Image: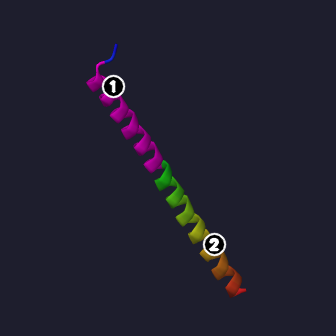
Amino acid sequence: MFKNRDLLRILVTHLAVLVAIVTGLGVVALLKGAQDQINASRYAERALER
């Protein structure tokens, strides 16, 4: 049987892991969005040159 302190430590660890995963996914999404913006602006510049 778990002690309350052990249970709390397990819960905190899981929360920390979840936060890290969500943060990582958020950063990846932001970088992908930034790359899409750069590609879109380059495409727009090329379109204007023609």
Q: Report the coloring of the rendering.
A: rainbow
Q: Residues within 10 Å of mark 2 (few under 14, many from 20)?
A: few
Q: Earlier in the sequence, mark 1 or mark 2?
A: 1
Residue 38 forms part of the magenta stretch: no
Residue at 55% over, 59% down: 32
| Amino acid found under the numbered disc labelled 2 | Ala
| Quadrant containing the N terminus in the rendered view | top left
> Where does the magenta region start and end?
3-24
According to the picture, the residue beneath numbered tag 1 turns out to be 7
Residue at 61% over, 69% down: 39
Q: Main secondary structure of the magenta part?
A: helix
Along the line of sight, the residue nearer the viewer: 40 or 46: 40
In the picture shown, does residue 50 fall above or below 23? below
Image spot of residue 48 (x, y percent): 68, 86
Image spot of residue 49 (x, y percent): 68, 86
| Amino acid found under the numbered disc labelled 1 | Leu
Residue at 63% over, 81% down: 45
Along the line of sight, the residue nearer the viewer: 24 or 9: 9
In the picture shown, does residue 34 fall above or below 14? below
Can you tell which quarter of the image residue 20 is in? top left
According to the picture, the residue beneath numbered tag 2 turns out to be 40
**How far is disc 1 from disc 2 in space, using C-alphas?**
49 Å
Image spot of residue 50 (x, y percent): 73, 86
Can you tell which quarter of the image residue 16 is in? top left
Along the line of sight, the residue nearer the viewer: 35 or 18: 18
In the picture shown, does residue 17 fall above or below 9? below
**Residue placed furthest toward the top:** 1
**Residue placed furthest toward the bottom:** 49
Callout 2: helix, strand or loop?
Answer: helix
